[in-house]
């Protein structure tokens, strides 16, 4: 009887031990499965994070490139606006200079023609005999005093130089204006009419 009880108790302990071992084994297996699932989830998460990181890096590179292009385009636009403003300013200044330059150029041509006529008249007077010795002496004194020979020689050359300079100014003004669309039609002063009309004066239309 005692042996049977002892055997029964031993069997019960073994069963309990086996149950405990079975439970621990099940828990260990479940933990291992959970760990493997966690590792797989972690690997998937890492893959997704790396993928998203790569996408974000690529997007950041694209945004940085687009921003650089935008800054370059903005700088070019500002430079273009500055050049356009400068062109408008130059064209406006050239437009304002063109009228007076044209008047000066035309006026110098008229002045040169006037001077030529004065010189012709002086030559006629010089070849006209003067019977009064006192008058002739006074004329010679006045001629020497104003250095008439020098004036008659140098004044036409001075006018020629001024006319060349005026022509260069007028051409430069026209070139600057042609770089922009002209906003007005410029009326140039006419050349002085010939002798039949010259005595009536010079009428210049601006």
Image (cartoon, rainbow, N blue to C red):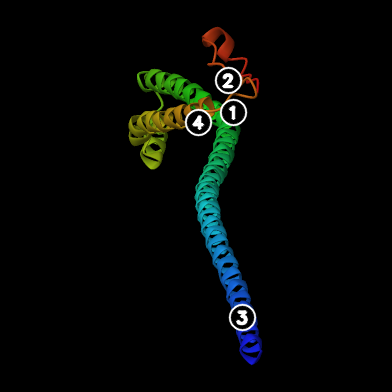
* C-alpha span from label 2 to label 1: 9 Å
Q: Which residue is mark 2?
A: 189
Classify residue 11 by image quadrant: bottom right
User: Alpha carbon of mark 4 to alpha carbon of mark 2: how far?
Assistant: 20 Å
Q: Residue at x 52, y 10 (%)?
A: 195
Q: Earlier in the sequence, mark 2 or mark 3?
A: 3
Place residue 186 in its image quadrant. top right
Image: 129 above or below 43: above
Which residue position holds label 4?
176
The residue that disc 3 covers is 11
- Between disc 4 and disc 3, the foreground one is 3
Task: Return the x and y of residue 110 as percentages of the image width and height.
Answer: 50, 22
Could you classify mark 4 by the number of other residues whose Cα lies within 10 Å: few (under 14), some (14-19), or many (20 or more)? Answer: some
Badge 3 density bin: few <14, some 14–19, many ≥20, Cα 10 Å: few
Give me the C-alpha separation between circle 1 and circle 4: 14 Å
Q: Residues within 10 Å of mark 2 (few under 14, many from 20)?
A: some
Q: Secondary structure at mark 3?
A: helix
Q: CA distance from mark 2 to mark 3?
A: 137 Å
Q: Secondary structure at mark 4?
A: helix
Label 1 crowding class (10 Å Cα cut-off): few <14, some 14-19, many 20+? Answer: some
């Amino acid at each position: 009887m005692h042996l049977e009880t002892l055997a029964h108790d031993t069997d019960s302990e073994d069963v309990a031990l086996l149950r405990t071992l079975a439970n621990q084994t099940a828990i260990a297996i479940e933990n291992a499965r959970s760990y493997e699932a966690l590792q797989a989830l972690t690997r998937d998460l890492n893959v997704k994070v790396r993928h998203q990181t790569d996408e974000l890096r690529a997007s950041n590179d694209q945004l940085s490139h687009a921003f650089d292009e935008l800054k370059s385009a903005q700088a070019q636009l500002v430079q273009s606006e500055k050049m356009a403003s400068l062109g408008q300013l130059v064209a406006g200044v050239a437009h304002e200079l063109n009228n007076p330059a044209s008047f000066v150029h035309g006026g110098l041509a008229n002045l040169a023609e006037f001077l030529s006529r004065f010189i012709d008249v002086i030559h006629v007077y010089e070849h006209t005999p003067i019977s009064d010795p006192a008058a002739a002496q006074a004329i010679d004194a006045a001629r020497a005093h104003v250095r008439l020979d020098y004036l008659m020689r140098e004044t036409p050359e001075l006018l020629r130089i001024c006319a060349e300079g005026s022509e260069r100014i007028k051409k430069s003004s026209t070139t600057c204006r042609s770089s922009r669309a002209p906003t007005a039609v410029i009326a140039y002063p006419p050349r002085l009419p010939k002798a039949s009309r010259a005595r009536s004066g010079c009428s210049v239309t601006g």
